C-alpha cells in the first residue's frame, strides 16, 4: 500500500483510485439513451429508467435481465458499440469530481480510475469531460478491482457502490464513499466504508487532512 514518506525530499501524496459511474460522473442520461436505442434495434423491451437506478455491476449482469442467456454477449457488444454516440455527450461531471482528482495530483499522488465500464468508453468519458487522470483500468467489478488497485499502489479507493467498498477492502485500501449512486450514507456505512463523504466537494479537505496525518505518522516512524 502506498503511504507518505519523508526522507528529506518533497513528500509525495498517495495513489488514489476512483470509481467512474456515479462517483466521478453522472452517466445516467446517456446510459438510458443507449439502452433505449438497443431496445429499439432489437425489439426487446428494456426499462431504461430502472436500469439507471442500479448502475455498478457488470454490463452482462444487467443485459441478462432482458435478453436470454444465449443473446447476452451479442447484446452487450452491441450496447458497447452504440455507447459512444449515445452516452458520451450527455454525461456530466459530478460536483467536486474535477477538484477531487486535482487534489490528488496536486499533492504529488496518482489518480487512477478503476471501473466496471468497458475501458475504451471510460476513457472517452474522461477525455470529453476534461478530467485528467494517470491511469484507467476498466472491466473490473467489486473484489475484481483489488488487483488493479494493488498494482497501482492505491492507498484509498473512492466509490459510490457496495461493490466499491468490497473492492477497497480486498485491496487493503481505505474505502472512501459518496452517496451519489444507488446507496445512501447509512447503507455505505453498514457495508463497512471507512469514510462516507456527502459528495466529492468534501474530498479535497478530507484528503488534505488524510495526507497530513499520514505525513505525521511517517515523521514519527523516522524519529
Image (cartoon, rainbow, N blue to C red):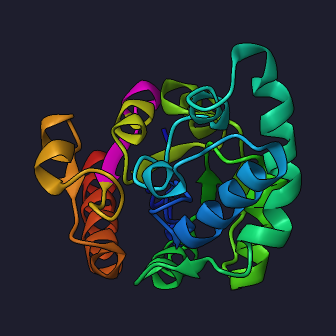
In the rendered image, is residue 126 in sight?
Answer: yes
Give the residue displayed 79% in from the left and 58% down from the top.
121
Q: In the displayed orientation, state which residue is furthest to the top.
A: 70
Q: Tell me if residue 170 is in the magenta stretch.
A: yes
Question: How many labels sit on residues?
Answer: 0
Residue 109 image-quadrant placement? bottom right
Q: Position of residue 176 (x, y in %)?
A: 31, 53
- Asked if residue 215 lies left or right of residue 8, the reply is left
- Asked if residue 100 lies left or right of residue 161, the reply is right
Q: Position of residue 140 (x, y in %)?
A: 64, 34
Question: Is residue 91 shown above or below 187?
Answer: below
Residue 213 image-quadrant placement? bottom left
Q: Position of residue 127 (x, y in %)?
A: 78, 77
- Asked if residue 141 lies left or right of residue 176, the reply is right
In the rendered image, is residue 222 in sight?
Answer: no
Give the residue displayed 79% in from the left and 60% down from the top.
83
- Asked if residue 70 lies left or right of residue 66, the reply is right
Give the residue displayed 57% in from the left and 39% down from the top.
149
Q: Nearer the viewer, residue 8 or 74?
A: 74
Q: In the displayed orientation, state which residue is furthest to the front.
A: 43
Give the residue displayed 20% in from the left and 35% down from the top.
192
Q: Tell me if residue 113 is in the magenta stretch.
A: no
Q: Position of residue 75 (x, y in %)?
A: 80, 36
Q: Nearer the viewer, residue 25 or 200?
A: 25
Q: Nearer the viewer, residue 67 or 91?
A: 67
Question: Is residue 147 shown above or below 127?
Answer: above
Q: Nearer the viewer, residue 30 or 120?
A: 30
Range covered by the magenta-colored residues: 169-176
Amino acid at each position: 500500500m502506498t503511504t507518505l514518506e519523508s526522507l528529506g525530499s518533497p513528500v509525495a501524496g498517495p495513489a488514489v483510485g476512483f470509481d467512474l459511474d456515479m462517483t466521478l460522473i453522472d452517466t445516467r442520461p446517456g446510459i438510458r439513451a443507449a439502452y433505449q436505442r438497443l431496445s429499439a434495434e432489437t425489439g426487446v423491451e428494456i426499462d431504461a429508467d430502472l436500469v439507471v437506478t442500479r448502475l455498478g455491476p457488470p454490463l452482462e449482469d444487467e443485459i441478462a435481465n432482458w435478453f436470454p442467456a444465449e443473446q447476452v454477449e451479442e447484446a452487450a457488444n452491441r450496447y458497447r458499440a452504440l455507447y459512444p454516440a449515445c452516452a458520451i455527450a450527455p454525461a456530466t461531471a459530478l460536483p467536486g469530481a474535477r477538484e477531487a482528482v486535482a487534489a490528488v495530483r496536486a499533492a504529488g499522488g496518482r489518480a487512477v480510475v478503476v471501473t466496471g465500464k468497458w475501458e475504451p468508453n471510460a476513457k472517452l468519458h474522461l477525455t470529453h469531460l476534461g478530467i485528467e487522470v494517470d491511469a484507467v483500468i476498466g472491466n473490473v467489478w467489486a473484489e475484481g478491482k483489488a488487483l488493479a488497485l494493488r498494482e497501482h499502489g492505491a492507498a484509498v479507493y473512492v466509490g459510490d457502490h457496495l461493490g466499491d467498498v468490497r473492492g477497497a477492502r480486498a485491496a487493503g485500501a481505505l474505502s472512501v464513499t459518496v452517496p451519489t449512486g444507488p446507496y445512501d450514507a447509512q447503507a455505505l456505512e453498514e457495508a463497512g466504508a471507512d469514510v462516507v463523504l456527502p459528495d466529492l466537494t468534501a474530498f479535497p479537505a478530507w484528503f488534505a487532512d488524510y495526507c497530513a496525518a499520514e505525513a505525521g505518522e511517517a515523521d514519527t516512524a523516522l524519529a
